Amino acid sequence: MTAALWALVALPALTGAVLLVAGRRADAVAAPCAVASAVAGLALGGAVAATRPAAAAPALAGIPAGLAVDGLSAVMVLTVTAVHLAVVLFASGELGADEARARFFGFMSLFAAAMLVTVTATGLLVLLAAWEVMGAVSYALIGYWWRGSERVRSAGLAFLTTRAGDLGLYLAAGAALAGGAGALQVSGLAGLDGVWRDAAVAGVVVAALGKSAQLPFSFWLSHAMAGPSPVSALLHSATMVAAGGYLLVRVEPALAAAVWAGPLVAWVGAATAVLLGVVALAQSDLKQLLAASTCAQIGFIVLGAGAGGVAGASLQFTAHAAAKSLLFLCAGAWLVTLGARDLGGLRGAARRHPLVGAAFTAGALAVAGLPPTGIWAAKDAVLAAALRSSPALYATGLVAAALAAAYAARALVAVWAPPLPRQSGAEHAAADGPGSVGGPGSVGGPGPVGTPLSLGAPLVVLAAGSVALGVFALPASAHWWRALLDVPGEPGPAGWEMAVSALVSVVVLAGAGLVFARGSTRAAAAEEGGAGPGTPAGAGTGAASGTVLLRGRRWAADWLGLERLVRGGLVRPTLALARGLSAFDDRVVAGGVRVGARLGLTAADAVRDRVETTADRSVGAVASAVRTAAVWALRPQTGLLHQYYAQAVVALLVLATVFVLMR
């Protein structure tokens, strides 16, 4: 089945390349080609997951380009191909006919190919190449509507932030090569010696945290929402953002070998799950809420990898991919039909479009960790690993789980609340892209979104998957899952742990739902009474505490001020340093060169005026003397024989005289 493995990554790559080269000429056939490629990819994914093939090709001297499928990568391959098919099928019905469909579906296919290489790569060389392709293609997809300068800026910021973290993989590859890891194999990182292992693990951790939008890199995911909703559904569920979590799970033995790495990774994941849960709770934009919740939910994957919970982290990867891609697609469907993405504008959206509302509810309940959904089973397995590592880590994870239930409740209340009488989609329009409301590509109309099969089928399948994955909470299924991932000895959660987490999710979901429902009712009454939607509930009571809460909410809604912190603490000092170095180069280095050149010219002029002139005169005098001597030497040369004899006699007399005198 080696050919199937090569075909698995080659098919979407070739599909994407052909569509991109063909350009607008292929717009009409782009969606069918992408869907057909995705269907074939899912079939190939199932084949390689069942047969577990390995393949290799020569790359650099002694470093082959290898792909292989084991238990972990089999799960990831099936997850990626299934979500890719669902998203592409949905996008084929949502994307307008006047859009650059070949460019969109070409980049989507190319991105899926890069992710498939990432999850099957056996060496850092191939992994690094796929990692770079993912970063570049994500820039193109986030900035798909490139005519909007703000969208391009958002795409650039997301790319540069993840690119900064990606440099860690270069450090890891260099350390692995210097430490003697056989052909840069990922499996060889744990066996490196001392400092090389620490350097390689540190590089992998930085790259993974950056790609997965964990603290302190989380803010870039807010800007990534500038892309179309299907892009968010693919990139931020089962592919790009999840790739960092997958990489940490893959190198879990190396994290355990480097004693410091496991606890650090676990606490970063737990902190992200809590703090970004607070950020999600403070959002009034549905896509921003889903983006922040993505960071928080990926935090559970990172927590599981750091705590040694491979089974729980892997299940969280799969369950989150199904639920979050479903939620992003639902958000995109409402955006197209209602022209709204803010929670106020989405009041009653689930009532107006029951199919999308039911699917969204299933995904939100899964994100809330409500039993018997997949994230509930995954979260319990992750928390069990956290409890074995540290009770404080377990408690932090429970807080994050409670926050997940709270922000899920906020989203559910918003979409199920009765719409205001004066509410209309035009009043709450939120531009998610040109031509998104109405037009040839819209799915608007009085009926529910999802009437076309291409829109409804992916939602139903993903909703079913979000719930059905809860089967892995059963002991028999959990045992099979651990055996599949080759961690049969990894303990699962105890019964009381599952009961506690379920109770926390149910209580918080119900309590938060009641609180948000009352707040929604008061806001509706205030708007009906003319107070306006911006009138805060309870204004005039507890002014000081209200001010503190308002500031805290603004801080959370601004994604903890991370972007401003990075700009103030890193970007501006770096630019200031660059400007200072540039000035130093211009004024000191280049100025020194210019001064040296002037001194050289001055010295040359002085040498020319004094030394060189004297030398010229000396040379001229010598030449004149030689010429004079030559003239005198030529005078005896008359050509007369008797004069030559006379000269010879004189010369002999002179020599004889000298001889007599010298004696």
Image (cartoon, rainbow, N blue to C red):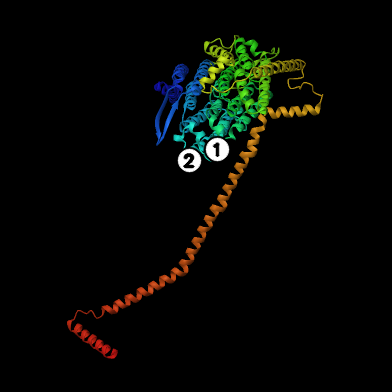
For this rendering, which residue is in front, 580 or 484?
484
- Residue 314 falls in image quadrant: top right
Q: Position of residue 223 (x, y in %)?
A: 60, 28
Inspect the image, locate mark 2, and give the three-letter code of the amino acid beneath it.
Ala
* Few, some or many residues within 10 Å of mark 2 (<14, 14–19, 20+): few
Q: Looking at this rendering, what residue extends furthest in the right direction?
A: 541
Residue 312 numbered tag: none
- In x, y percent, where is residue 460? 56, 12
Residue extending farthest to the left is 641
Query: Which quarter of the picture shows residue 620?
Result: bottom left
Circle 1 — which element?
A: helix
Gap in Å between the C-alphas at discs 2 and 1? 12 Å
Residue 322 visible in the displayed image:
yes
| Image quadrant in which you'd find residue 448 | top right
Locate the N terminus by quadrant: top left
Determine the residue positioned at 43% across, 24% down: 22
Left or right: where 646 falls relative to 272: left
Q: What's the mark number on residue 198?
A: 1
Q: In the rendering, at what x and y percent does residue 408 appear?
A: 66, 19
Q: Position of residue 523 (x, y in %)?
A: 74, 18
Residue annotated with mark 2: 178
